Amino acid sequence: MTIEEFRREIRSLKEKGIYPSNKSYMLPSLWIAEKNFPAITKEIMRVISEELSVPLVEVEEAATFYAMYHTKPKGKYVIRVCTNLSCMLNGGEEILKEICNLLKVKPGETTPDGLFTVEEYECMGLCDGAPAVTVNEDRYLKVKPSDLPEILKKYGWKGENGKTSP
Ligand code: FES
């Protein structure tokens, strides 16, 4: 998506008139940016600020407050592993450790090929399926360490001795 296309998306969202104020369109606009750009840059925040007539500082605050938004470049696939209470008690920390082992990254890092970013996450509201993992918008519940290679392969991981490729 180009910046101009993004601008048009915000305008067309506003034309739907589904929210009560300009400011109400800020989080949906950030979400459009999150899904269509590697990172929510200053330029993107400025576009949102201009289109919604919301102070830039408020857009920056929202973009940096919510963990679902990335202001630094992320991988094509963002893997989130919950380590909050239910997930921790059901092995979430082991899952995180194993994903990091397989991809050879630390939590918060992106693989060198830009394919995966791994994040430790607070509760995702999937506690009855603990431990929970998401890959972009796909959900995996009651995950076991032995499930991980198959899950990662769906997104292009080539195996421990192979090379990941986008
Ligand atoms: S504690 Fe992990 S999803 Fe709620």
Image (tube, rainbow, N blue to C red):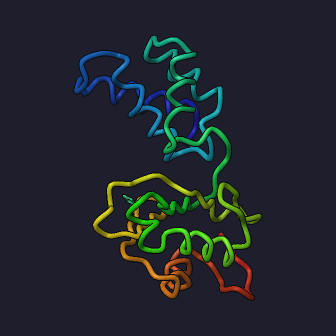
Q: Quadrant of residue 165?
A: bottom right
In the rendered structure, the answer to whether residue 126 lies left or right of residue 66 reads left
Residue 161, percent from left and from top = 74, 88
Residue 82, percent from left and from top = 47, 61
* Residue depicted at x 49% and y 45%: 68
Residue 124, compared with residue 69, is above or below; it is: below
Residue 2, percent from left and from top = 58, 38
Q: Quadrant of residue 85?
A: bottom left
Residue closer to the observer: 69 or 29: 69
Quadrant, the C terminus = bottom right
Residue closer to the observer: 36 or 134: 134
Count of labels shown?
0
Residue 24, percent from left and from top = 33, 23
Q: Quadrant of ligand 1?
A: bottom left
Quadrant, the N terminus = top right
Residue 53, compared with residue 39, is above or below; it is: above
Residue closer to the observer: 99 or 26: 99
* Residue depicted at x 36% and y 72%: 141
* Residue depicted at x 52% and y 41%: 69
In the rendered structure, the answer to whether residue 48 lies left or right of residue 43 reads left
